[in-house]
Amino acid sequence: MLKRVVLLSLFLFIPTIAAAESSAPHEIRIGTLYAGSGAFASSSIPQYQGLRFWVRRVNARGGVFVKAYGRRIPVKLIAYNDQSQTGLAGSLYTQLITRDRVRILVADFGSVLTSVAIPLAEERQILLIDPTGTSAKFFRGNNRFLILTGLPSSGIWPTVLADFLIAHKIGRVAIIYSANDFTESQDQTLVSRIEAAGIHPVYNHAVANSTSSYTLLLHQAVARRAQALIELGYNNNDIALLQDLSAGGMHFAMVFTINPGLRVPLFLKAVGAQALGGTFTYVTPPSLAYNKVNYGLGLAAFKQAFEPWNRKHGNVPLGLSVIAGYNSGLIIQKALETAKRYDSVALRTAIRAVSGRLFTLDGLFKVDSRGNQIGEPIPLGQFFMSQEKLVLKVVYPAKVATAKPLYPAPRWGSGRG
Amino acid sequence: MVVAITVLAYVFIPYGYNNQFLLFNMMMYMALAQGLNIIYGYTGYLPFGYVGFFGAGAYGSALVIIYLHWSPFPAVLLGGLAAVLVGMLLIPLFRLSGAYFSIANLAAAEALYYIIANPHLASVTQGPYGISLPQVYDPNAAYWTMLAILVFALILSGLMRRSRFGLALGAIRENPVSAEMAGVNVVRSRAIAWLLSAFIAGVSGAAFGWYISVFYPETVFSLSITVFAIVFVLFGGSGTLLGPLVGTLVLYGAYNYIGISTPQYFQLTYGLLIILLVLFLPSGLTSLLRKRGIDVP
């Protein structure tokens, strides 16, 4: 009897296993674009580097485990250079979908280069992993195949900053923000939160992304007797503002800019330690190490593995963009490990299923039904000068703080003090 | 003949080559190159700010879709008219000539970009936050519309080349003073060519905006759009119907081929290719045929 059951089982299952094996692809094709030149190159190349690093790691273990086929399959990353041009990016995304037949698309850096991929992915029903395109308009419609992976939605970012301003009763707040999706939504969130607490900004002004001189705007903030100067912009905006502040000798009790805490080496090189001293900023990986990582490498292990490889392959500065690229790879990996089928709908369903339970070196991965990431609020940090060395510490909220905030900030720099 | 081959190519190529976005871009640049050819090839005025018409068309069309709920086809035509309106405002630039005209035109396009992208006008133009048109997204319809625009541009360019009006423009290109003395109404002829050229760029921009459905001011006012159109016209040979078509086909084809096959050497290879072609074929590809006594349409 037992012999019959075993034989019957073999008879039934062997063809099924064989069929699954035969239909399994010999590689998992992931398509992406990077900007090798142009306006987005300085952030796009590090993001691509992070993704490449993830591919190298999974392939070193024989590939990524794909639950739908019950085995490891090597990953092939197909990447093209869009030169920061949306027109070219559109035809290259289409190339990846229609000619290279990728099943998973990873968008290039930022909202502008992601924007052209969204209707294409929706029309062709391809899973679109969006590492850094945080524009709110992407997540308003019914995009069934879009997932934001590397950064939280831009509306989430300033919540802790707003709480800090309210808690410290900083009533005279001047805000200068760059006119783009990323920082405009931060401005809206910040203003609505502080206004709800009775703080009305004394100055709230949008500037072009290409703004390279802030002197006039800083004088406007001084004239309005602002205690806190909040500048929401890209790298180039923050660098220009900090340089102008340093050169102009103006001082505010609090200066906040977004990017120094995201890319410390870049800012140290661009504006110097003196100009950064006392500045408030967001603190994200790699300046912030989460201790509850339950998937992928923790920050220390990541740095140890990434840095030798990075030195041989382009040597990009380690910042949030690298982490966002690597983290996108991890989300793809988790989706492949848990999805019952290897198709876009099943992969996205798998990602939604792990939402809120996955903690990577980039923090809690949690997305809403539209694929918008709503993970953890981003803590507030401040640069301290200690024996002529600059140190970035988390100062708010208190439960994760590693130092007490210095408010009003002292004058450390030659220009600012 | 040229028009028929072009139409057949874009009707049948998608059955064998399914990168529709690339084909759309190729058609768009062919139309833009023809539009630029009308003003530059026939009258000698080189507008560096040609992209301003393209962007005006994209925004003119998108705004009537968003605010007035127009369907895409009339919106595309309105995009062309928006570009014509901008062209009319810029007619005084013809007081300048040569490089001065080109640079003033570029400044005008930049000014238009900054007006559209101004965050304080976001309630009207959506400012720097871009346009989203998911309600009319239909890449196939936009593809056929772009083909119709290309056909229109080719027929217009072909008719102009063989007409009295085209001859008048040629006379203006060679010497405006002599043309005026010979009875050509220089101001009117040049303005008509300018507005026709603007209309082609405007409808092309409108169709492009419809095709991609999500775009930002920097997408449709990108200087690279003008640069591409100028390079394609110069490479193929200005003042002809065939030149801009061949220029776009070869250079844009090579641009995409290199970008896909060897992305790491993209700029190097493409740059070298253009340098070599400028050095050895300064009058464009069609000059090779002319040297052999072949009449190039």
Image (cartoon, coloured by chain):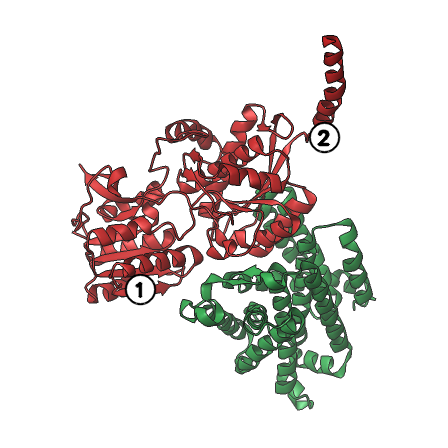
Q: In x, y percent, where is residue B33?
A: 66, 66
Q: Which residue is drawn at 47% across and 72% down?
A: B124
Q: In x, y percent, where is residue A177?
A: 35, 59
Among numbered discs 2 and 1, the one appearing first in the sequence: 2
The tint of chain A in the picture is red
Q: In x, y percent, where is residue A360?
A: 43, 34
Say whether residue B83 is visible: yes
The quadrant of the picture occupied by the N terminus of chain A is: top right
Chain of the residue under the numbered disc 2 shown in the image = A
Read off the residue under disc 1.
A204
Query: Do marks 2 and 1 both belong to one polypeptide chain?
Result: yes
Chain of the residue under the numbered disc 1 shown in the image = A
Q: What residue type is labelled 2?
A: Ser
In-image side of A55 versus B3 (left or right) = left
How busy is the neighbourhood of tag 2: few (under 14 within 10 Å), some, or many (20 plus)? few
Relative depth, front residue between A30 and B40: A30
Secondary structure beneath dot 2 equals helix
